[in-house]
């Protein structure tokens, strides 16, 4: 499928050398993991859907002037991105209590938080992505205080946009995770949004039915992951050409 | 031992109503716990030593102009303190890697940190005092950003003093935990240091031998807790009148 040099293979995506210096090709796999890779399944067509949904979101964020690594989608599973120096943090923005915050603070799942809360986890599967604070991040030099300020402003802008986008299609944005990187342009360095934004990296609940439309379907063994991801794409008005594994050919959703 | 009204009984201390409004009596028990109370033993004489060591430290902090709740020691187990509105945080200052940080970030115990790191835990035994960040603290209203600034300045000053104090007697201050409270004086409110500072709340290693002289002796079943606490008091030049349970009468150490 790809004759380019492989740079990195992660749990859900592969990075290949891009056509120009400073670019990469991000390939979306069907691999679905939980517990830092402890559980692992192949879910046919997930990569195709995430590639399309992430393209959709990043294109609109670029349009809003929020800097991202995204250049363009190449095909069903690949997108062209700018290579960045990834900051080893998972930046989590939470609007409602879910997941680890529920356990950590003993909250009722779905409770609206007093305000949006940004959390940082140190990206290290072996350590299970431990939560860290600004103190750890700056002491260990993972990001400077100025970079953290940029990251937090960016995270808030992304949250504002995504909250509105999903609300418009009847979906509650419970929380999401982003990654940021340093983009070097000549002498300048900017913090940009990298990685992906998809139902793999967001918690999305149907506003009316409270149905979960995100990777929690896999984490909690609820089944129907692809159907729900496709529903998210459909509601966003995305034309989804699903894999042959799923349908007999390209298929117009909506 | 005390005919005053009991206000609160914690794991290691009891608070009684004080002689004047706005004051409390803090009574140091011999109860020693680990794992948020999961393990529990009575270690004869620990309360007496902690009362003396904490008196020593708080007196000198007051002298340096660092505001604390401490007024005076009353007897072997009791001290008179100002009542404050406790901020429900354990404020941890770390100079070297130990305890939970070792596990969280996969560090070698004893590694010097790039700089002192302040951590916050939400004081809630049932939740096992979960680590929280400034975001959680301000979002849930446990402290305001201005209060957090005061708390962090105070924590740094305490760390500077304690590092020097212990270094002077051949002890390395690995980390320690403090609690702060709001002291209302008329229309004014100040953040002051509360609770205790003792080998129960510090990690203290002998600089030459690396011997542990703190509550890790209990946590790690090393034995000899009292002997080590007494050694800390002794090195600080504190006259220790230990319990009759330990000696036949008041005893001049050093
Ligand atoms: N623009 C970019 N430049 C360089 N690396 C990136 C960029 N965007 C994302 N990455 C990294 O590529 C990897 C994407 O693959 P993924 O399967 O998510 O990996 P992981 O298992 O490490 O999360 C991640 O490690 C991510 O940090
Ligand atoms: N000046 C003060 N005013 C009010 N409460 C205090 C003050 N100093 C300490 N405290 C509280 O008193 C209790 C001391 O007892 P302790 O055994 O340490 O309790 P715990 O098991 O809750 O840690 C703690 O809950 C502490 O927060
Ligand atoms: Mg990833
Ligand atoms: Mg206590």
Image (spheres, coloured by chain):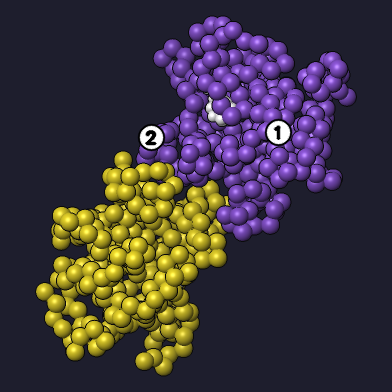
Chain colours: A yellow, B purple
Residue B53 visible in the picture: no
Residue in view at x 43 percent, y 60 percent: A90
Where's residue B131, x and y in %? 50, 45
Q: Report the front residue among A19 and B140.
A: B140
Say which chain tag 1 marks.
B
Number of numbered discs on residues: 2
Q: Quadrant of the N terminus of chain A?
A: bottom left
Q: Eyeballing the image, is B83 above or below B10?
A: above
Q: Quadrant of the C terminus of chain A?
A: bottom left
Say which chain tag 2 marks.
B
Judge from the rendering whether residue A159 lies leftward or rightward of residue A189; answer left or right: left
Q: Eyeballing the image, is A167 above or below B121?
A: below
User: Which structural element holds mark 2?
Assistant: loop
The tag on residue B141 is 2
Say which quarter of the image contains residue A111.
top left
Ligand 2 neighbours mark 2 (CB distance < 8 Å): no
Judge from the rendering whether residue A183 lies leftward or rightward of residue A46; answer left or right: right
User: Which structural element holds mark 1?
Assistant: loop
Residue in view at x 81 percent, y 32 percent: B227
Q: Residues within 10 Å of mark 2 (few under 14, many from 20)?
A: few
Where's residue B106, x and y in %? 61, 59
């Amino acid at each position: 499928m790809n004759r380019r040099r492989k740079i990195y293979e992660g749990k859900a995506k592969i990075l290949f050398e891009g056509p120009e210096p400073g670019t990469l090709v991000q390939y979306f796999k069907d691999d679905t993991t939980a517990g830092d890779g402890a559980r692992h399944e192949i879910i046919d067509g997930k990569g195709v859907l995430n590639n399309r949904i992430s393209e959709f979101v990043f294109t609109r964020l670029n349009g809003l002037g929020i800097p991202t690594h995204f250049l363009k989608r190449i095909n069903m599973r690949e997108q062209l991105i700018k290579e960045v120096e990834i900051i080893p943090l998972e930046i989590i923005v939470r609007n409602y209590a879910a997941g680890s915050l529920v356990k950590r603070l003993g909250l009722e799942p779905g409770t609206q938080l007093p305000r949006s809360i940004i959390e940082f986890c140190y990206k290290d599967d072996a350590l299970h992505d431990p939560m860290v604070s600004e103190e750890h991040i700056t002491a260990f030099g993972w990001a400077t205080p100025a970079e953290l300020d940029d990251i937090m402003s960016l995270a808030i802008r992304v949250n504002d946009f995504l909250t509105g986008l999903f609300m418009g299609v009847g979906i509650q944005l419970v929380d999401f995770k982003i990654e940021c990187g340093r983009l070097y342009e000549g002498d300048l360095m900017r913090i940009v949004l990298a990685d992906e934004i998809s139902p793999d990296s967001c918690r999305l609940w149907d506003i009316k039915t409270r149905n979960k439309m995100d990777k929690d379907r896999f984490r909690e063994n609820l089944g129907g992951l692809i159907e729900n991801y496709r529903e998210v794409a459909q509601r966003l008005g995305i034309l989804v050409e699903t894999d042959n594994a799923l349908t007999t050919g390209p298929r117009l959703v909506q």
